Image (tube, rainbow, N blue to C red):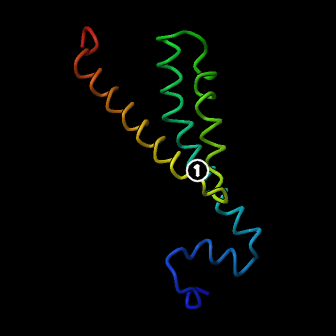
């Protein structure tokens, strides 16, 4: 079937042409869910633990507070929010840079 696909996004094209557009949508949604899962395990947990230590509350509540909008914006069929994704990426990168700067300027004691 790969000889019949002329573009680079072959995985979704395989699903769309072979199984139909419904499977194509669900394949794209699964990919978005997998990306969100990586973020949940890494970034959102770190964010939740850090904010809970600074402000208070539980880490999972803070992580969920940033995960829910991120998941809602992850719908690949809703392309009007691409600007919000770019803003989210810029904020995430800024937070990571701030964490690194804080770690370098205030190292742990006894190390």
- Outermost residue toward the bottom in this view: 3
Residue highlighted by disc 1 = 81
Q: Which quarter shows the C terminus?
A: top left
Q: Nearer the viewer, residue 110 or 60?
A: 60
Asked whether, in this view, residue 79 is left or right of residue 46, the answer is right
Q: Which quarter shows the N terminus?
A: bottom right
Residue 62 locus on image (x, y percent): 59, 22
Q: Element at badge 1?
A: helix
Q: How many marks?
A: 1
Point 48% across, 12% down: residue: 53
Q: Nearer the viewer, residue 108 or 10?
A: 10
Point 43% across, 36% down: residue: 91
Point 48% across, 27% down: residue: 46
Asked whether, in this view, residue 101 is left or right of residue 47, the answer is left
Asked whether, in this view, residue 105 is left or right of residue 94, the answer is left
Residue 67 locus on image (x, y percent): 61, 35
The relative height of residue 49 versus residue 18 in the rendered view (above or below) is above
Residue 99 is drawn in which quadrant?
A: top left
Point 58% across, 50% down: residue: 81
Residue 84 locus on image (x, y percent): 53, 45
Residue 18 is drawn in which quadrant?
A: bottom right
The relative height of residue 107 versus residue 95 in the rendered view (above or below) is above
Q: Residues within 10 Å of mark 1 (few under 14, many from 20)?
A: some
């Amino acid at each position: 079937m790969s000889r019949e696909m002329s573009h680079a996004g072959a995985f979704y094209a395989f699903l769309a042409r072979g199984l139909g557009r419904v499977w194509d949508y669900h394949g794209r949604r699964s990919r978005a869910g997998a990306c969100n899962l990586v973020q949940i395990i890494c970034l959102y947990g770190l964010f939740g633990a850090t904010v809970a230590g600074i402000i208070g509350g539980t880490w999972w509540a803070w992580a969920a507070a940033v995960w829910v909008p991120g998941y809602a914006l992850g719908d690949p069929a809703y392309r009007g929010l691409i600007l919000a994704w770019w803003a989210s990426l810029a904020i995430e990168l800024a937070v990571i840079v701030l964490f690194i700067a804080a770690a370098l300027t205030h190292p742990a004691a006894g190390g």
